[in-house]
Amino acid sequence: MSGAAVKAGRGQAAAPRVGRPPSVTVPQIVAVALELGLDNLSLKQLADRLGIGLATLYRHVGTRDELLRLASFELMLRRQAPAAESAHWSEVALQYAETLLQSFIAEPQLITELQRGRLGPHVEVDLLEKFLGVITRHGFSIDEGVRLFHAIGTVVVGTATGMTGNRAAEAAGESWKLETRRVLGARDDDELPLVRRAYPQFIDPGIAQWQFTIRGLLAGVAAGRGEVLPADLLSTPAADRAVSITRKGSGKP
């Protein structure tokens, strides 16, 4: 075969791709990861959806844990305190708390990342800046705003951990209610009398308990400021107010 023929044949064949791989950015990677959902997400699934190879993805995200941290960061930043100038500060704080709780309920992986120390200042500083930007316009000092910010975070994390744990147990066929009943049934009738009286409330780490806890926190802050909470705060039935605080796709409060 002549050299000209070889060249012609090469010209007809698909030339191998050279140079840079298909263009993709970290924000694009994170956006698609959140679209797919962080639970059980694999890098192979993500690469396929993006239309790139794993090698290309690894150039931007070294490990799945790194991807989860980046996605967690973005998800947190999307949950902003409302900038409602006319709202009472307690409503602003409540809306912030509810959107933060929704983040943890929608993506339980965030709780794991927090427990592993991977949701650190790189996430918190942006959240705090936005929260303080709103709450200080309602007469709070920066120190008071920071204390409220951390108090809300503590209540939210505890609530989200309890709710996701309870749902995971139910999904595995190990209802917290039934297990508690078995535990109490295995004890003598005169044991744990106070727990038995508290039994119905004790086993329900749901929205009603969340409302009681967050309202108590806000009422305490209001009392310290010489105020009383608005009468209509949290007056909406728990089932209605919990519509957005659900596990993505579950339809359960």
Image: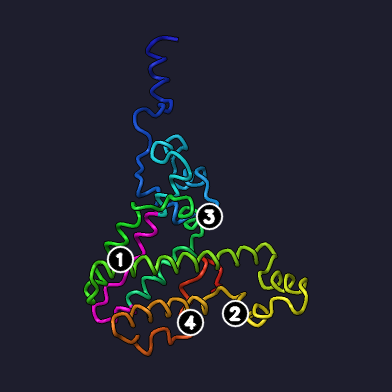
Residue 222 % position (x, y): 33, 81
- Per the rendering, the mark at residue 87 is none
Q: Secondary structure at mark 1?
A: helix
**Mark-to-mark CA distance, 3 and 4:** 27 Å
Q: Nearer the viewer, mark 4 or mark 1?
A: 1
Q: Which residue is mark 4?
A: 240
Q: Earlier in the sequence, mark 3 or mark 4?
A: 3
How many numbered markers are drawn? 4
Question: Mark on residue 39?
Answer: 3
> Image height check: is 20 above or below 118?
above
Residue at 34% x, 74% y is 93
**Nearer to us in this view, 195 or 101:** 195
User: Mark 2 = which residue?
Assistant: 201
| Residue 73, position as x, y percentages in the image | 38, 54
Check residue 146 in the rendering and tell me which mark sits there, or answer none.
1
Which of the 4 image quarters holds residue 150?
bottom left
Counting other residues with Cα less than 10 Å from the Cα at mark 2, is it few (<14), some (14-19), or many (20 or more)? few
Q: Residue at x 78, y 71 (%)?
A: 186
- Quarter of the picture holding the C terminus: bottom right
Report crowding for label 3: few under 14, some 14 to 19, many 20 or more residues within 10 A (C-alpha): some
| Amino acid type, mark 3 | Asp
- Cα separation between marks 4 and 2: 20 Å
Residue type at tag 2: Gln
The local secondary structure at tag 4 comes to helix
Identify the residue at image location x=44%, y=64%: 103
- The range drawn in magenta is 73-91
State which mark lies toward you, 3 or 2: 2
